[in-house]
Structures are given as C-alpha cells and as structure tokens.
Amino acid sequence: MFFSFRSWALWRVVGPLLAIVLLLGGLSAGSLQVMSAVRAYVAGESMWSKGQKDAIHDLQTYVSTGAPLYLQKFDAAIAVPLADRTARRALESPGNNDAVARAGFARAGNHDDDIGGLIWLFKYFRKMHHVAGAVTAWRNSDALLDQLIEIRNEAANDVALHDPSAATIRHWAERIGAVDAALSTLAVDFSVHLGKASRQVSALLLLVNLVIAACLAGIVLVHTRRMLWRRWLAETALAVEKERAQLTLASIGDAVIVTTQDDRVDYMNAAAQRLIAAGQEVTGRPLASLFNIAEQPVRGSFQTADADDESRPQLLVRPDHSSVPVSVVETPIVHAGEPAGRVMIIHDMTAERRLVEELAWAASHDALTGLANRRQFEFELHKAMSGSPAVGADLMLIDLDQFKIVNDTCGHMAGDRLLKQVARLLAAEVGGSGLVARLGGDEFGILLHEDGSATHDVAADVAERIRAVIEQSNFVYEGSSFRISASIGLVGLADSAGVQDALRLADVACFLAKDKGRNRVQEHRPSDTGMAVRVAEMSWVNRIRKGLDEGRFCLYEQEIRPVNGALKGNDRRELLLRLRDESGALVPPGSFLPAAERYGLMPLIDRWVVRRAFEIIAERKHQPRKIASYAINLSGATVGDSDFVDFVAGLFAQLDVSPASVCFEITETSAISNLDEAQKFIARLREIGCSFSLDDFGTGMSSIAYLKDLPVDIIKIDGSFVKEILNSKVDRAMVEMITKTAKIMQKQVVAEFVENLAILDELRQIGVDYAQGYAIGKPVPVLTLWEEKIA
C-alpha cells in the first residue's frame, strides 16, 4: 500500500525511529565535539606546562650564568601561559569576549581548529565538577606566574648576577625552585582534573549512548512486534475471509465462475461444477470450450394485451447441445486500470420458467374448472370486437338456476363438483367453435365465433341446445339428486358498442331470462322495451355509486302533524331521500330506488341515510323548537341485515343521539316477506329504545292477520286509501277499520297523502292520530343550523 510523506500512519511508525536516529547523531556529534575540546585542553595544557618549564629553566640558567640571552628566552617561554591566562580571563569576564579569548589561545600556540572547542568547553562545562577543579588549578597558577615574572625582573636588576657567586646562585635557585614546585603541583592538579573530566564525560556519553541505544532497540522491538502482530491479524483475517468467501461461494445456489485475463477458468463453485463441468476438472481451460450463451426469442405461455411483445431469455448451451434457460451477470476484474478477468454469476432459470408458465396459466384460467377466467375471456372478447367487421361473434352469459340450493343443501364441495360438471358439458358442447369461461360464482360465458356465413340464428340454436343439455343432465351428490337448469342471455357483438357494453347487455338478458321463469334463453334485441328498461336500470348502478362517492345524495323533511289536540306539541318529521344529478337537478326516488333494490345497493344507501339523519338530529338537539321524533325509511334488504343493528348502536354512541327520537319505517311488504327476520330486527332495535312504523299499511292481502305478529308502534295507512276518503265509502271504511284495529292494539295511526283540509277534518272525525301530506307541509330540504340562520 502506498503511503505519501503526509501520511500520519507513516510518520506514526517511522517518526520515533527517526527521532532516535537524529538524537543519536546529535549525541555523537556532541560527544565528538566534547572529546575534541578535551583533547585540545590536554594539548594546550602540554604547551602551557612546557612554556612554564622552559621559563623556569631559562631563568635558572640566567641566574647561573648571568647571560642576558636567557632572559629573552624566558620572556618567550613565559608568554605561552600568560596568553592562556589572558584567554581564560576574557572568557570569565562578563560580556562577549570570544575574540579576545581566541587571540589569547592563538598566541599560546593552540591550533586554530582547536580554539573553538576550547572556548565552547570552557563556557558550557566550566562548572562541571572536574572541569571546575581544573579551572581552579589554572586560576591559582596566575599568582605564581606573577611571582615568576617578579623574580625575573629582580634577577635582571641584580648586579651580583653579572658574576654570580655560589651563594647568590643558590639564593635565586631556591626562589625559582619554590615557584617551580608550586606551578608543577598546579599543573599536575590541572592534568588530573582534566583527565577525570575527560573520563567522566566519556562515561556519561557512553551511558547516554547505551540508554539511547536501548530505547531505540526497545522501540524497534515494539514496532516490529506491533507490525508482526498486525500482519498476523491481517493474515488471519484474510484467511478467515478467504475461507468464508469460499464457503459462501460453495453454498450459493447460483453458478459462480472466475476467469483469468485470457478468459480461462480460474475458479468454479460447486453449483457451477454441477451446471457446466459435471464434476470434471476444468481449471485453466478456456471458458468458450465449456459453454456459450445464446439468446432465443420465446413467446410467453399466456396471452395478454401485450402478448405481441417478445422476451429474449438467455440459454446456456453445452458442448452436447443441451441447453438451460439462465440469467447471467458479469462483472469485470480490473487491476491497476487493466482488465484482469471477470466474474460470472449464472442463475438456472428452469424452476422460475416453469413457475412463470404455471402462473401464466393460473392468470388466464379458472383454478376450479380449468376453463378460461374472466380476464382471458374479456381479452378474447376485446380481440373479437376489434377484428374485421365481416367476421361476427356472439356472446352468451349462463347462470345456473339451482346452484344456491345445491350449495345450501349439500355444502360448497357439492357446489364445486356441480360447477365442474357444468364446465365439462359446456366445453363438450361448444368444442372448437368458441371459448368457454367461468366468469365467477355460478356464471359462465361463451364466445361463439362466426365465419361470416353463419347467422345469429345459429348462435340461438347453440344456446338452446346448451340449455337443453344442462336441463337433461342430472347432478347426484352423496345420494341426493338434483335437477339443474340455466338461464342464458344471448347478445350479438354487432349490436354492442364495446366489450363492457356487450357484457352489460348479456347480463341484462340473463336477468330477464330469470325474471321470465328461468331455464330459458333470452336474446337481446334493440327493439325489446323490457331490455331497454332493464338496461336503464343497470345504468343507474354506476350513477348511484358515483352519487354516493361525490356526496350528491341529500335529505328532505316533511312534517307529520298531530290531528287531535291531545298530541299537540308532539311534532314529527319524516326524512326523505333525494339525489341530485351531475347538473344539480333533483332526481325523484322512483327513478333510482327500483334499480338500487334490484341490484343490492339499498343497504349501502340506507346506511348513508341513517348516518346523515343521526348527524342532523345531533345538530338540532339544542335548538328551541323540539321535534319529538324523526321517521327514517329502511328497505327490505336492510331489515334482513344482521350487522345493521350494531351499526345503529355504534352511531348512537358516537353522535350522542337519543334512541327515543328515532322511528324507523319499514314497508308492509318487506316486513311480511320475511316475517321472522323482521320480528327479530324490530325487537333488537326496540330494545335499544327506537320505535317502528309500518309504512304503506293496507296494501297487502293479509295486513290485519300479520299486524298482531309485528311489534310496531305506529301504523301508516297507505295514501291510496286516504286521498279518496271523501269520494269512496270503501276507502273511508278501510281507513276507519285500520284506525280502530290499531287503537285496540294500542298503536298510533298516521295517514299519508292528506291533500286538503277536508280530508284532514274527516281523518280527525275517524280518530287518526297524525296526518302527513301537502295540506300539512311539502317536503323541504334539510338545513343545518348555520343554513337555517342564513335562511
């Protein structure tokens, strides 16, 4: 790995070593300088001693001979120690006197290269123990030199020395000898201290060098150990990672191949060995000799709207020409910017391809019967309707008439078996002339293809033949035998505007076949008024759902006023449903409620009405004018809905509405059509605290007989009797009979369609409790409290 000189990791490793090396280099240089300075002092001391000895000798010779020449020699010899003294005193004096000291040492005969060491050692080491002792001995020699000079001067002035006697010579020799002895002692002392200082410095330098060397060795050892430890960790981690990678590659289900730069096999995992090499050793062999990857256009196994698109799966072709569908991912290996091989990951797509085909079949077929499903059927229908107009086709929808009986009697397994039996009958009857599909539940669809020469009557014959075959078949399950039949709706695609229109028309035809008695074929003809009515009803289904989604349903209210004074102040309101169309115009209930009832939308509408009614009651709870109760109409489908009671109870708790203020209205026909469910439904809501009104009373054949079995609180006389009460004695008698019967059963009576005051007076005489109609008040929009304030 490359490290730049700015790398902290590099300096962290090399820095301590460089510091130790530099320290050793500096210490060695310092040691050499100290030893050189010590050597210079030893040499200087030698010249100093020699000058002092020569001066003593010359002076003694002078006093022995009296020859002036020896005085001159004395002066020349004594100049050496005097020059050294001058240099020393310059260094001891304050200030920078290095130049004076350098001149003094030069006059004393010291070599120029040694003078710097003499000055450096004196300045920085003179206080060192043994160096200080040598300097002290040197300093003590100053007085002796002065004495020696003084003796010289006295000897030069002594006349007796021109012709010295033995006594005179002895006298001067004794004086000179005393100074010589003292100087010799100091010279020895200086040499001894200087030698000790030299040895001390040598020992200190040796110790420091040993310590530094030991530190350097320790640091090198620590760093070496750390580097070896890190190398061991790296090698161990690399070995673990390599083993893990090998285990991972070996355990991968996909084939993994690593090639060299010349595209030869460098590595194969176990999956690759099984897929390609079949256990042979292939390392080093060219990859092209083992297999090649080819692309082959393959059409999907099921048809969709984009079935023309072709996918191009890859095929691994072996040398024996066997092939496997695969997917291949390649990654190049690059080293130092140059290609060094590649890694190939090959996934065997055999299982996925089989699964795709199974899913494709499941996406286009019914799992129970094996027929085409609605998706495939609509696709084929779309293709048939978008083809050439010269080639026509017919659409049949088949609905089994007795399927619910079989399911309820013998269970869903019997129903499934019946569906399979019918599917086989249909497939055998249609053969290759059309497509048979199960569209859902017990509903089947058949698309009959025409070749242009056949007519619509041929499709009608086929439909009648299918009806007859189903009718003649017999379904037996666990000893129970059932006669089955089917209602069939037939539509020519030429009479349809599109796929959805064709399905809708066929659905309407099938419904009409059921309405006309079942077990029949109903053809769609544009001139059929019954079909037109049913198509119009079916168009209301989407309009009703859209109205609910867009909030275009609204409530009106109509007053129900007490007729006699005893009930004064006990005002009531009936909440009536209205729908606004896309342009905002009101649509009367008679236009959309029949379609809603026929196609099962009334429970959805009833829940919207009840929720909105409860919100209105909660808003008006604190207004000054009190309304005793609100009448809310419920359909027969809701009366049979067991979850509706829980829905109402939840609204009471959520909106804090009193159950006593709610009166549910159900029609006589819906109550009598399922008396047991109606009784349970009414009883559960009355337990909560609601009241019930029986609407349109008197229209049924057995109204009075059933009245005692219905726990209602109010009877609402049908308006067909009330509006003719002044002109028909029979209608008046009916109203009077119903009123008397209700009084006996302690039920209140409401009369509808009260159009004028004369009818109201007649009802008052009969004893009717409440009146409702245009004479009392017309239906008006329900306003919120904010809207009422604005109005």
Image (cartoon, helix red, strand yellow):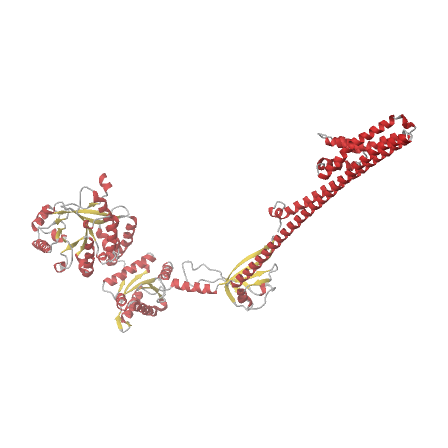
Vertical position of residue 776 compared to residue 353: above or below: above
Q: Residue at x 25, y 61 (%)?
A: 512
> Quarter holding the C terminus?
top left
Q: Residue at x 23, y 63 (%)?
A: 516
Q: Residue at x 56, y 65 (%)?
A: 291
**Apparent side of residue 182 relative to residue 432 in the rendered image (left or right):** right
Residue closest to the eye, 281 or 456: 281
Vertical position of residue 476 compared to residue 604: above or below: below
Percent of width and height locating residue 382:
37, 59
**Apparent side of residue 436 relative to residue 576 in the rendered image (left or right):** right
Evaluate whether residue 73 shows in this view.
no
**Apparent side of residue 69 relative to residue 131 in the rendered image (left or right):** right
How many marks are shown on the rendered structure?
0
The single residue placed furthest to the right in the displayed view is: 163
Q: Residue 454 appears in which quarter of the rendering?
A: bottom left
Percent of width and height locating residue 154:
85, 27
Percent of width and height locating residue 114:
77, 37
Evaluate whether residue 588 shows in this view.
yes
Residue closest to the eye, 641 or 54: 54
Q: Residue 232 appears in which quarter of the rendering?
A: bottom right
